[in-house]
Image (spheres, helix red, strand yellow):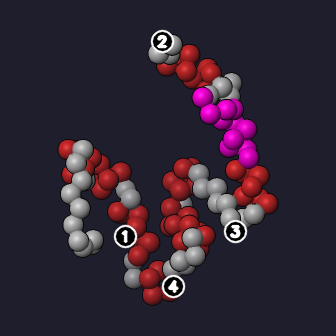
Amino acid sequence: MPPLLLEEAFELFRDGVSHFGPFWDHSLGYYRASQESPKKVLVLTYEAMMMDPAVNIKRLADFIGHPLDPEEESGGVVERMMSLCSFENLSSLEVNKSGVQQFTAQFK
C-alpha cells in the first residue's frame, strides 16, 4: 500500500479511520471510563496541562498515589517538575541531540 498524502491521512483520521479502530470511539471510551472510575482512569489533556500545569501536576501526583505534602509544595517541587518537563529542557537533553542515552548509577 503506498504512503498517504498528509491531507488524505488527515481526512481518514478526522473520519475516525485508523489501523487501530475509530479514534474518536477509543477516546470517548477512556473519557467514559474516567467518569465511571475516576480513581482508576485519569484523562489529562494537553490543553489542561498548558492552562494550569501546577494544578494538573498536583492532580497527577494525587492520582498515582503520591500526593505532594505541604513542604514539597512550598519547597518548589512543582516548579522544578515544570522546569524539568519544559520543552526547552527536554529539547536540550543530549539524548534528543544524539539519539543515545548514557545511563548512570545516580539520578539528579
57 and 103: which one is in front?
103
Residue 5 in view here:
no
Q: Residue 24 location in percent, x, y?
A: 69, 36
Contact (CB < 8 A) between labels 1 and 4?
no
Q: CA distance from mark 1 to mark 4?
A: 15 Å
Residue furthest toward the bottom?
71
Q: CA distance from mark 3 to mark 1?
A: 26 Å
Q: Nearer the viewer, residue 23 or 21?
A: 21
The residue indicated by pointer 2 is 2
Residue annotated with mark 4: 69
Task: Say whether disc 1 or disc 4 marks the residue closer to the N-terminus.
Answer: 4
> Which one is in front in this view, the residue at disc 3 or the one at disc 2?
2
Q: Amino acid at mark 3?
A: Lys
Give SS at disc 4. loop
Mark 3 or mark 1, which is nearer to you?
Answer: 3
Q: CA distance from mark 3 to mark 2?
A: 43 Å
Q: Amino acid at mark 4?
A: Asp
State the separation of the CA atoms marked 2 and 1.
46 Å
Classify residue 55 by image quadrant. bottom right
Dot placed on the residue nearer the N-terminal end, 3 or 1: 3
Q: Is residue 28 magenta?
A: yes
Asked which secondary structure carries label 2, the reply is loop
Magenta residues (range):
19-29
